[in-house]
Every structure is written in structure tokens, then in C-alpha cells.
């Protein structure tokens, strides 16, 4: 009987917490005949409010305590373009401008996104390929950056026009106007074979088969004497215009500086009929060159006019410019206008370093 009453008391306690409990007990049953089965079969009615809820929390603790699991975190995806940085957005400036720091897709602008960031990038082609006009760092490719871009034949990244790649990013070639070191002797940028630089970018010379204007009367491409063109001079010219020495060193030209100092001390004492040709020029300057010109210390110039053909052989002086004196030394020579060129009977210089200069006329 005590067990039954304990069970009832427990049910009453539970019901008290949950609502209203009505217990119906059959009093006709004998206390001695009361069994557990009788108790379980005796009817009872549990009534409670539909809105009542059972207590939650630690079963071993206060049955009335409740743990609140609700939070205020908003997981709703943001709307790109509303100006508010929402879930899943890196930025949102509320506009559709892809040239600022926040793209219309609400991503932060970066090199390679395919949009040119104003004031930051010069280009953006959306890839990381070099040589396509827009470099991987979003700078424009240009001639001289060392990367061969579309439309360039080469790009060695330097300003040297004497190597195999010009500063225009074109391959060096004969006729481009630049002398390629170790390959060309000259390059005047034209296709004429009557000047000082002929085809193949080699210096014009007697026997190359090209008549050099103002220098050669003929050029039969050989050195055979008695064939009507000897030393590129026809048989009709006077003796002083034949059998001559040709001075064609480029360093003799008035435009040349002093890389190596030369001196004309070794010319024959009795004089030598000579003419200027090729890179040296075609005649002598009639105005004093500056000191250290013509590959020497004291450059020599003709003090007087070039004679005409009818004048024959004329006497002239060559002056040498040194220490501010344009005629510090003076050497008498003879000059002969041979028609296609001018001859100079040059004498040894009085000291070194003095040298006869050539000019292009």
C-alpha cells in the first residue's frame, strides 16, 4: 500500500508542475488485496492546459529552468548593389562602375579581373600572359621593356643601335642607317652604290665595280693595268691624277674625334699625290676643324680655295690647329683638280701629332 501511495504522490507532483491531475481510486478494493496491477488498471485522468509545456533543462537540476538557444545572427544573403556589404560580398559601393575599387559584382578590383582600375592600372586584359600588349602587372607593353610584344621583331631592352636589335624593336639590317658592330663597315641608310657606302654595307673602294661620284672617273671592278681604267682613273687624265695614293680612313674625317692618335710624319719627303675617298671624305676642309678632330691632336686644313679644273696645279698651304692658333704650323703643298676628284701633293708634317683632315666637300 505504501508503494501505491508513493506512486500516486509522484504522479501528483508531476501533475502539479504540468497542470491539473485528477485521480480516481476504487475504495472498495481491499488494502490487502491491492496489487501493482490494480493500481495500473485503476483509472485516472490527467488534465492540463494545451498551452502548457514541459520543463526543459538539466533533468537533475531545477525542473523549471529553461535554456534560451535563440540568436540574432542574420544569415540572409546580401543584395549586391544595395550599398550594404552583406553575406557573401567582399564590398558593395552601390554602383555598377567597374573602374573603381569595388566591381559591380561586389568583388574587390584586382589586376587580372578584366577591368581597368582607373588611376591604378594602365590596362587589364584578364590574363597573366606577357607579350600580348598588357603585361601581367597590368602595365602596357612597349618597345624597350625587354619583352617582345605583338608587332615587334625583337626587344633587347637597351638603347644600343649597334647590336642585332634596334631601339625601334626591329631586327638590324643593312640599309637601316645604323652600323652594326662587327658586321657592317658602314650603313648610310640608302641603296645608292655611287656614294661612300655601297651594297652589302661595305665602304666604297676602287675596284668594287661601282663608280663613286665625285671620286672615281671609272671603276671596272679589277686592278688590271692598261685596260683603260687604272686605279679608277681613265687614261685621259694628266699624270698627277694617276698612280695615286688613296686616303680613306674614317678617322681622318673632320667629324671623327680622337679615339686613337695618328700622325702623318711618315709621308714621303718629296711629297705624295693623294686623294681622299670613302669614309675619309672627298676633299680637304677649308675651315679649321676643332683641336683633337680627325683622329689627332692638331688637325690640318687647306688654307685657300679648292682650284677648278682649268687652274691646273696650284700652290696652297695646310695649317694645323693647336693651342688656340688655327695655323700654329704650316706646310706648303700642291693641289690639282682632276675633274671627278681633287688631288693633293702632301708633305710630311713637322711634328706629332699632326694629321691631314678629309671632309665630305
Image (cartoon, rainbow, N blue to C red):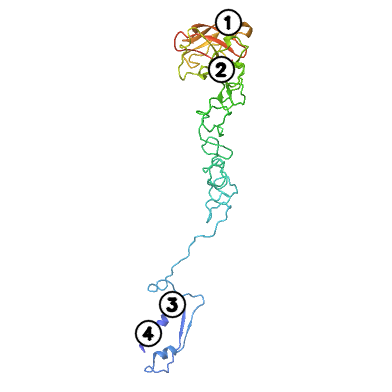
Q: Quadrant of residue 218?
A: top right
Q: Position of residue 292 (x, y in %)?
A: 48, 15
Q: Tell me the CA gap for discs 1 and 2.
A: 21 Å
Q: Residue at x 39, y 84 (%)?
A: 7
Secondary structure beneath label 2: loop
Residues at discs 2 and 4 in contact (Cβ within 8 Å): no
Tell which circle, 2 or 4, labels the residue nearer the N-terminal end. Answer: 4
Tell which circle, 2 or 3, labels the residue nearer the N-terminal end. Answer: 3
Query: Which label sits on residue 277?
Result: 2
Secondary structure beneath label 3: helix
Q: Closest to the observer: 17 or 259?
A: 259
Specify the farthest residue to the front.
226
Query: Which label sits on residue 17?
Result: 3
**Residue at mark 4:** 6
Tell which circle, 1 or 2, labels the residue nearer the N-terminal end. Answer: 2
Query: Which label sits on residue 314?
Result: 1
Q: Closest to the observer: 273 or 88?
A: 273
Amino acid at each position: 500500500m505504501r508503494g501505491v501511495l508513493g506512486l500516486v504522490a509522484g504522479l501528483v507532483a508531476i501533475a502539479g508542475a504540468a497542470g491539473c491531475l485528477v485521480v480516481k481510486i476504487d475504495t472498495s478494493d481491499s488494502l490487502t488485496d491491492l496489487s501493482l496491477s490494480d493500481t495500473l488498471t485503476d483509472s485516472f485522468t490527467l488534465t492540463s492546459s494545451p498551452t502548457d509545456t514541459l520543463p526543459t533543462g538539466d533533468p537533475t537540476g531545477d525542473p523549471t529552468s529553461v535554456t534560451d538557444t535563440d540568436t540574432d545572427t542574420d544569415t540572409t544573403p546580401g543584395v549586391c548593389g544595395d550599398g550594404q556589404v552583406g553575406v557573401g560580398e567582399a564590398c558593395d559601393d552601390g554602383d555598377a562602375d567597374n573602374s573603381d575599387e569595388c566591381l559591380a559584382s561586389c568583388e574587390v578590383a584586382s589586376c587580372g579581373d578584366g577591368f581597368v582600375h582607373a588611376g591604378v592600372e594602365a590596362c587589364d586584359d584578364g590574363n597573366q600572359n606577357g607579350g600580348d600588349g598588357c603585361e601581367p602587372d597590368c602595365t602596357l607593353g612597349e618597345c624597350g621593356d625587354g619583352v617582345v610584344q605583338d608587332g615587334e621583331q625583337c626587344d633587347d631592352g637597351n638603347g644600343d643601335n649597334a647590336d642585332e636589335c634596334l631601339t625601334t624593336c626591329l631586327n638590324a639590317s643593312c640599309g637601316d642607317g645604323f652600323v652594326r658592330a662587327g658586321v657592317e663597315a658602314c650603313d648610310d641608310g640608302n641603296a645608292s652604290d655611287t656614294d661612300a657606302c655601297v651594297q652589302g654595307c661595305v665602304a666604297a673602294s676602287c675596284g668594287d665595280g661601282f663608280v663613286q661620284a665625285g671620286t672615281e672617273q671609272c671603276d671596272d671592278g679589277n686592278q688590271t693595268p692598261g685596260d683603260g681604267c687604272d686605279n679608277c682613273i681613265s687614261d685621259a687624265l694628266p699624270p698627277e691624277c694617276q698612280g695615286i695614293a688613296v686616303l680613306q680612313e674614317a678617322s681622318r674625317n673632320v667629324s671623327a674625334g680622337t679615339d686613337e692618335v695618328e700622325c702623318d710624319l711618315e709621308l714621303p719627303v718629296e711629297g705624295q699625290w693623294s686623294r681622299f675617298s670613302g669614309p675619309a671624305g672627298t676633299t680637304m676642309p677649308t675651315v679649321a676643324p676643332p683641336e683633337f678632330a680627325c683622329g689627332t691632336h692638331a688637325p690640318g686644313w687647306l688654307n685657300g680655295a679648292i682650284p677648278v679644273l682649268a687652274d691646273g696645279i696650284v700652290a696652297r698651304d695646310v695649317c694645323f690647329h693647336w693651342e688656340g692658333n688655327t695655323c700654329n704650323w704650316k706646310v706648303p703643298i700642291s693641289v690639282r683638280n682632276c675633274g671627278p676628284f681633287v688631288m693633293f701633293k702632301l708633305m710630311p708634317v713637322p711634328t706629332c701629332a699632326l694629321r691631314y683632315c678629309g671632309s665630305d666637300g
